[in-house]
Image (spheres, coloured by chain):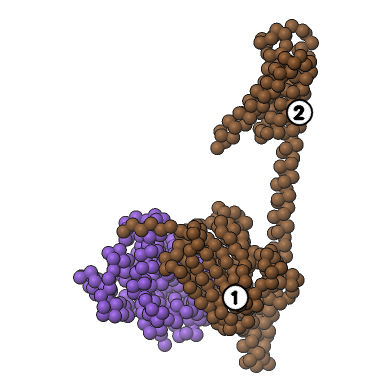
């Protein structure tokens, strides 16, 4: 039995049943809430490890729920949205959500996202990673003190911009960072030109750390939304293949 | 903008008035009767009504014509007086005649425009009706299978063996997946119908977009091998992400649907001057020449009959064409060597300035 607890917030009964049944068959413990108020209650009472949150709730706006939860908790939040427009995903991510799922989603996709979030949650508890002077993820290592990055023991030759990007992604490992969030943190501004050059830097950075077809994928592209660094473990390949 | 139109119309009105006055002066010197000059002025008003949109211009033209006629051609000349009492009647009739002419001409033009708009609307309505018909037909088939299979599974009290049940689950899954694809296409259609306003153009890396599209391809169809090739690691194109992903998904899905299992689908992207060219080729049986244009028509399905086998709705490729057209690019079919089809589309290349 898994010790992790997942809070499912969804007002539509069939979809809620689908999610809870999926969780049950994969041995996850879960709590369910049907609106924003009860979601806040459950979240504050039971402190779940991951929250699956539907954006279209009857009482509160999903974005409000995220903002409220973020005032006291860093629990990973995966947003579920029926609208396929990117703008509300981006708003949710910028409000503090970690990841998103668009309806209709497949069960495999749901499980894959959940695994990423749970790993993230576990990592946060065990090491309080933000203040460490060395970051390690698979073969990737960043020494924040000396300002150097290494791949499989060899030093990477990164431009200052690439190094900044890598550090930002590493510090937010597991979270989908929006283009706006990244450009604001790296350039201090955000306009279309920045986003376009961000793509170029990201492409060159990825070439340096993900060369070769069998190399693990450290950075995931979310087209139209942003980027995220994934924790590299043995079953990481399966996550990419699920969706 | 509005002021510009107003000035343009005023200039047209004045130009026509000057021209008619010139002709009037010519007639006057040729000793033609005044009736000729009046007719020329009325013709002038008629032309003004045709070439300008606003009713005001033809009224202005009517009044100015009468004044000009009075000023230039009646005794005493170059004054606004007239000696002969009959001229008052002439002026009144001339004004009336030119006003009526102007009004009639204006109305005629308006009617013609309204008819044109009504035709366009009817055409759109027709397209929408066809679309609705095709969609409701295509919705019914998978929905029948989904609800029927689910109903049978619910009522089952042990008669169905595991293999049968498995097949039913699979059918439900496949049909709902097909509906998911249909909904994606419909969303794109409504965005196209609403016009360019809803386009969200950004500069994107082509390989990221192709990867994103391939993530949406039905994973069960792995009997086909999909290969990607890029001439340049940093190939940028201007696009609406959602719509271009939809184009690639539709073309690749189409290739999977119409080529035998084990076929190779190759996606190649490269720069061609100001454009990025994406070539999606397969080594199937190819597209006959007489179909090369028709596959982009709504509802064309090869044998051109609506049949009850799934995936009959020829919505995917016409949608691709409208999307690429709206992006200012082109979409066409070529023959692959030695056999197969190549779907080629172009998009405007994007320029990226790097400031570090």
Q: In the rendered image, which quarter is residue B299 located in?
A: bottom right
Q: Which residue is mark 2?
A: B101
Element on which disc 2 rests: helix
Disc 1 chain ID: B
Q: Is residue B348 visible?
A: yes
Residue A33 location (% of width, % of height): 48, 72
- Where residue B220 appears, x then y in whole percent? 56, 81
Residue neighbourhood size for the residue with mark 2, other residues' Cα within 10 Å, grouped as few (<14), some (14–19), many (≥20): many
B283 or B220, which lies in front?
A: B283
Q: Which chain does the brown colour mark?
A: B
Reading the image, the residue beneath label 1 is B337
State if disc 2 and disc 1 touch (CB < 8 Å). no
Residue B52 vs residue A179: left or right? right
Residue at horizontal 45 percent and vertical 62 percent from the top: B236
Indicate the quadrant where residue B301 lies.
bottom right
Q: Can I make out residue B183 in this image?
A: no
* Tag of residue B249: none
Q: Give the residue displayed 61% in from the left and 69% down from the top.
A: B334
Q: Pointer 1: residues within 10 angstroms few (<14), some, or many (20+)? A: few
Numbered disc in front, either 1 or 2: 1
Q: Residue at x 79, y 11 (%)?
A: B86
Q: Left or right: B95 with respect to B225? A: right
Q: Spot the purple chain and give its letter.
A: A
Most foreground residue, B134 or A26? B134
């Amino acid at each position: 039995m898994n010790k992790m607890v997942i809070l499912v917030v969804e007002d539509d009964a069939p979809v809620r049943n689908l999610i809870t049944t999926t969780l049950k068959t994969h041995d996850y413990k879960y709590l369910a809430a049907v609106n924003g108020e009860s979601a806040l209650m459950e979240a504050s009472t039971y402190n779940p490890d991951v929250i699956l949150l539907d954006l279209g709730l009857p009482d509160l706006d999903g974005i409000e729920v995220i903002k409220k939860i973020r005032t006291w908790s860093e629990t990973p939040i995966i947003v579920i949205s029926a609208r396929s427009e990117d703008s509300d995903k981006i708003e949710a991510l910028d409000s503090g959500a970690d990841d998103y799922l668009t309806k209709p989603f497949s069960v495999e996709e749901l499980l894959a996202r959940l695994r990423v979030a749970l790993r993230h949650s576990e990592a946060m508890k065990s090491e309080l990673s933000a203040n460490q002077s060395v970051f390690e993820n698979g073969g990737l290592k960043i020494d924040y003190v000396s300002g150097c990055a290494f791949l499989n023991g060899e030093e990477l030759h990164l431009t200052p911009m690439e190094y900044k990007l890598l550090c930002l992604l590493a510090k937010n490992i597991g979270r989908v960072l929006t283009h706006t969030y990244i450009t604001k943190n790296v350039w201090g501004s955000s306009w279309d030109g920045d986003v376009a050059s961000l793509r170029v830097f990201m492409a060159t950075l990825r070439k340096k750390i993900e060369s070769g077809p069998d190399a693990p994928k450290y950075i995931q592209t979310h087209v139209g939304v942003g980027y995220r660094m994934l924790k590299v473990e043995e079953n990481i390949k399966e996550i990419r293949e699920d969706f | 903008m509005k002021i510009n139109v107003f000035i343009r119309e005023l200039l047209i009105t004045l130009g026509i008035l000057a021209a008619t006055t010139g002709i009037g002066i010519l007639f006057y010197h040729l000793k033609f009767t005044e009736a000729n000059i009046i007719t020329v002025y009325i013709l002038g008003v008629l032309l003004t009504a045709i070439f300008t949109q606003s009713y005001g211009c033809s009224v202005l033209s009517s009044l100015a014509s009468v004044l000009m006629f009075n000023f230039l051609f009646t005794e005493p000349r170059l004054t606004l007086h007239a000696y002969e009492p009959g001229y008052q009647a002439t002026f009144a009739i001339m004004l009336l005649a030119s006003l009526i002419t102007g009004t009639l001409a204006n109305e005629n033009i308006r009617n013609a425009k309204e008819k044109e708009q009504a035709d366009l609307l009817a055409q759109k309505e027709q397209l929408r009706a066809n679309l609705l018909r095709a969609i409701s037909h295509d919705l019914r088939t998978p929905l029948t299978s989904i609800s029927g299979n689910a109903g049978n599974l619910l009522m089952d009290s042990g008669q169905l063996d595991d293999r049968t049940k498995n097949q039913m689950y699979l059918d439900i899954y496949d049909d709902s997946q097909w509906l998911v694809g249909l909904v994606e296409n419909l969303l794109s259609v409504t965005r196209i119908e609403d016009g360019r306003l809803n386009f969200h153009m950004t500069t994107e890396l082509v390989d990221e977009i192709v990867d994103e599209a391939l993530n949406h391809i039905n994973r069960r169809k792995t009997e086909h091998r999909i290969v990607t090739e890029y001439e340049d690691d940093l190939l940028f194109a201007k696009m609406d992400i959602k719509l271009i992903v939809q184009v690639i998904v539709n073309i690749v899905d189409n290739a999977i649907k119409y080529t035998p299992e084990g076929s190779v689908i190759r996606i190649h992207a490269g720069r061609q001057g100001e454009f990025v060219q994406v070539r999606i080729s397969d080594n199937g049986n190819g597209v006959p020449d007489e179909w090369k244009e028709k596959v982009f028509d709504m509802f064309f399905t090869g044998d051109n009959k609506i049949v009850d086998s799934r995936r009959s709705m020829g919505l995917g490729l016409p949608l691709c064409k409208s999307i690429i057209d709206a992006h200012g690019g082109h979409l066409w079919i070529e023959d692959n060597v030695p056999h197969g089809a190549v779907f080629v589309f172009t998009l405007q290349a994007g320029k990226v300035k790097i400031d570090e």
